[in-house]
Structures are given as C-alpha cells and as structure tokens.
Amino acid sequence: MIRIIGAGAVGTTLAALAVAAGREPVSLQVRARDRAAFAAIDTLRVERRRGALVVPRPALREDRDLDGVDYLLVAVKHAQLDAAIDALPAPPPSCTVVSALNGLSALRRLRERLPQTRVVPMTVMFNAQRLGPLHTELTTSAQLVIGSDDRRLRRAFAAPGVRVRSGHGEAAAWGKLLINLANAICALTHATFRDLLTQRALRDVYVAVLDEAVGILDATRTPYDLPLPLPYRLYRAMLAGNTQLPWHFARLRNGLGDGAYPSMVADVEQGRPTEADTLNGEIARLAQAHGLRAPLNAALVARVQAMHGRKPPPYVAAQTLREQLCG
C-alpha cells in the first residue's frame, strides 16, 4: 500500500499516476479542515496536453496509523516538512519513506529524523500546477527517477505515458537541482520556461549560474546525473549559442507548453515562501562547507527571499538582472 502525505500539485499528480498504474492500493493523508472538500470530489484529475487523466479518488485518511503501509511518500512543501514528520508515528520496519521534495535537504532531514527507517529519493522530473482541490495540470511530460533498485516501487508509478527509472543514489537529485536553479531566475523576472530558453539575457544568467554550480560539484567531487541525454558541456553550448535549440529541445523532450512556468513563479506572485534556499542555497552551502564561494547562487537566494510576502512582487527586468549578476 502507498500512503501519500501532501495533496498539492506534486502529491495529487503522483497519487493520480499511482492509481492509474493500478498496482498498489493508494491512500491520501488529509488534514481535518480539507476532508469535507476532498470527500465531495469523486476523482483525481490531471490535465495534460494529450488529454486529461481522470482516476477514482483514493481513500482519504486523517489518522496517522501506518499499519500495512509499504511506501510512505512525502510530497509536502519544505516549510511543512518538520510538522509532517512530527505528526508521524515510527514507521514499521517494512515501510519505506519516499521523499518527493526538490533538492537534497529534505532527504537529509528525513534520514536524520527517521534514523531507523529506509528513506529513498524520488526525483520528480515534471512540472505540475495546482488548479484546485485534487485537480492539477501537467505542463511537461511525466518522468520519475527513483534512487533505489526497488522494482516494486518503480512499477507502482509506471502509469501509461510515464517514464520511471532507477537512479544512482543522490546523483539524480543533484542533476534535477541543477536544472531547477533556473526557477529563481524565472521567479525574479516573472518569466516562463520559454522566456528563459529564448531570451538572450535570461540564458546568459542561467549559463553563469549553472557554470558556478557545476564547478562547485566538480570541485567537491559530488556526482550528478543531468535529466538530459546530453553531457553538461553540450547542454551549455546550446544555451550559450544563438539558436532557439534549447527551447525546441525542451518542448520535444519534456513536452513544455508556451505558458509553462516553475512553481516558484506562482509562489512569488502569491506572496508565499519559496524553495530558493533548498535549490540555489544548496549550492551555496556546499561551496561554503569546502571553503569555496558561489556568489551568483547566493545572490539569487537573497533576492528571491527579499520578495517573500511582497504583493505585487518587485520584479526585475531580464537585462537588469544580467547586468547586476554577470556584469
């Protein structure tokens, strides 16, 4: 049985994929205040470019009893993680905890707080937006990388049209983090993925931020697997070039639509805390721990955090951001 904690964009989408795969019973942990609204909805609905995925709503659970739960999937926001862990009983020995949060800090926190429990990373290689209770939209194709050789866990989410594969420990999570370093750039400039990959100023900033991060990973011998069929040097060459190849590549490989944007853009727009510190901040902390510096990533964290709670947000023009960060 799979229990999912977190019914936001990622948690709802993963629940729908597991129900569609049909290989494991699925239940969704809900807060008491949400139960009535969720119980009134009979289905999970995920909008996709090739047609909506609509599946029966899984069982709703308010209690924290984990008896019979084989996989506990955590898909809450980073700010809610400690509260979610505090509310859990000790998972039984047969239960694997799966972290579906971006970055590495949540995985480490779960392992620290649950030292007797097997905790594995699930790197979510898709972009989802919450449209309403139990209703999301996938703005990319659906891909998952699970940092384990657990075949049963992989098959549990292998719904039609979903690519699920095993990764090498934390390397996939680091690779996804590298791509997600762009989220702060989009949040600061209110940009879509298309803007990021077609506008020269935004691409220049992205290349500089990636170069800094990859340099830190290489210097600290931290392995990473980019979620791309390309080595970094070729991906960088595409970004630094004068063609529209990066955007066409992203549309073809990831199914990105013209209006797709990182969730951090919506967080800033609505005055919510963001994941900038768990993404760009992870690079800055890794650098500091080894006596190195990552000023660009540190600056992005500081700038995004300065926008928290400010409505309307003080967005910056792409060219201005390039001048400020890259000179």
Image (cartoon, rainbow, N blue to C red):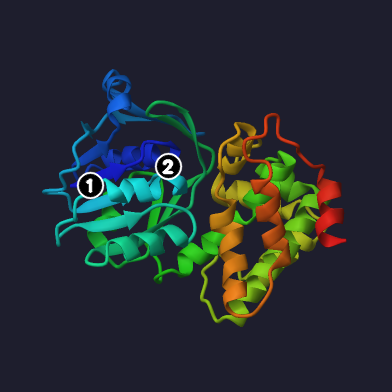
Question: Given the current orientation, which residue lies at the most extreme top position?
Answer: 40
Q: How many marks?
A: 2
- Residue density around tag 2, few if under 14, some if 14–19, many if 20 or more, within 10 Å: many
Q: Is residue 9 left or right of residue 25?
A: right
Q: Residue 2, which numbered label?
A: 1
Quadrant hosting residue 28: top left
Split into 4 quadrants, where in the image is the C terminus? bottom right
Residue located 32% across and 40% down the image: 15
For image coordinates 19% across by 42% down, the residue present is 64
Residue occupying the point 77% across, 51% down = 202
Q: Is residue 28 above or below residue 277?
A: above
Residue 213 placement: quadrant: bottom right
Q: Three-letter amino acid code at disc 2?
A: Val
Say whether residue 66 is visible. Answer: yes
Please name the amino acid that badge 1 sits on.
Answer: Ile
Relative height, residue 227 to residue 56 (above, below): below
Q: Estimate the x, y position of residue 228 in percent, counting from the top left.
A: 56, 62
Would residue 211 be found to the left or right of residue 132 on screen? right
Measured along the vertical axis of the image, is residue 54 above or below residue 250? above
Residue 82 or residue 65, whichever sits in front: 82
Q: Which residue is mark 2?
A: 10
For the residues labelled 1 and 2, the Cα–Cα distance comes to 15 Å
Q: Helix or strand or loop: what does disc 2 sit on?
A: helix
